[in-house]
Amino acid sequence: MSETSVERAFAILETFERERRPLSLKELAELCRIPASTCHTLVHTLLKRSYLYQAGRRKDLYPTRRLYDMGAAIIAHDPVLQRLLPAMQDLCETTRETVILGKRQKDGVVYLEVIESPEVIRYSARAGDIKPLHSSCIGKTMLAGLDPEDAREWLLDHPPAPVTANTIIDIDALLDDMAEGRARGFFATRGENVADVTALAVPVPLNNELYAIAVAGPSHRVDEHFVAISGALLQVQAEILEAEVTHHG
C-alpha cells in the first residue's frame, strides 16, 4: 500500500471520529475529499478486514470495535506508559489539573498520554496531538535537553513563530528562559502556546530517551498553586528516576 493510500485510509477513520455517525460511501468520499473509486477500494479493504461494517437500508458504513480493541491491547502493553501511568494518575489527583506525557518527534512534540483534569474548566488535549517545540512546555523541555549551542542552531534553522500574543519568539530570550528552567529543575509556559493556559513540565529520561511530564490548566488556577504544582512535579520526577535506578540496578 502506498503512502497516499495509507493517509487516505486514516482519513476515512478520522472522518468517522469527527462525524460520529454512519456514512454512505458517497458522503465518505466527499468528506475525505478523495475520488469515489479510491474510496470504494479502501472501504472494501476495511470491510474485508472487519474495521468497518454496513448497516441499515442504505448499507451505511461505520467502524467496528476492532480498532478500539486493537488500540486498547497496544496501550495496555506500552512499556513506557506501564511505568509512568500510575505516577501521572497520582499527579492528576494531587494537582486536579491535566497531566500530559510527551516526547520530541521530528520538529515537534507528540502527546503520548493525556489524563484530563476532573474540573469543568480545564485544559483539554488528546494523545497524538502535535505541539511546537518552541512554544509548548514539553517542547521547551525537549529543547533544553540539547546542548545550548545545538538548541540555538535548531532555533536559527526553525525561527520561532508566534502562536499566541505571549509566545517568546526572540531566540536569546527563549534560550534564557530555558536556562532558567534548567537551573530550577522544571520548565514553564504562561499562555505561550494556548492563551490563558499555564503549564509546567519536568524532563524524564528513560532508556536513553528524553520524555517529559507536564501539568497544564487555566492560568488563574495554576498560577495560584504554582509552587505546590511544581513541587508535586519534582517529587514525581524524583520517584520515577529512583524507580528507574532500582529497575536497572
Image: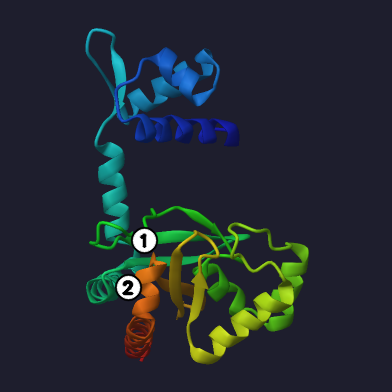
Give the answer, above or below, for where 132 lies relative to 61. below
Separation (CA) of disc 1 from disc 2:
10 Å
Verify CB contact (< 8 Å) between mark 1 and mark 2.
yes
Question: What residue did someone put label 1 on?
Answer: 113
Quadrant of the drawing holding the C terminus: bottom left
Residue at position x 36%, y 29% from top? Answer: 19
- The kind of residue tagged 2 is Leu
Q: Is residue 1 left or right of residue 98?
A: right
Density class for disc 2 (Cα within 10 Å; few <14, some 14-19, many ≥20) is some
Horizontal and vertical percent for residue 179? 62, 85
Q: Which quadrant holds residue 220?
A: bottom left
Residue at position x 31%, y 27% from top? Answer: 52
Horizontal and vertical percent for residue 174? 66, 75
Horizontal and vertical percent for residue 190? 50, 70
Q: Is residue 244 left or right of residue 185?
A: left
Horizontal and vertical percent for residue 163? 60, 57
Quadrant of the drawing holding the N terminus: top right
Residue in the foreground of this view, choosing between 58 and 130: 130
Q: Which mark is residue 84?
A: 2
Disc 2 secondary structure class: helix
Disc 1 secondary structure class: strand
Give the answer, above or below, for where 107 lies relative to 203. above
Q: Which quadrant holds residue 97?
A: bottom left
Q: Is residue 170 left or right of residue 229?
A: right
The furthest residue to the top: 57
Give the answer, above or below, for where 112 lies relative to 2. below
- The kind of residue tagged 1 is Glu
Residue at position x 25%, y 56% from top? Answer: 120
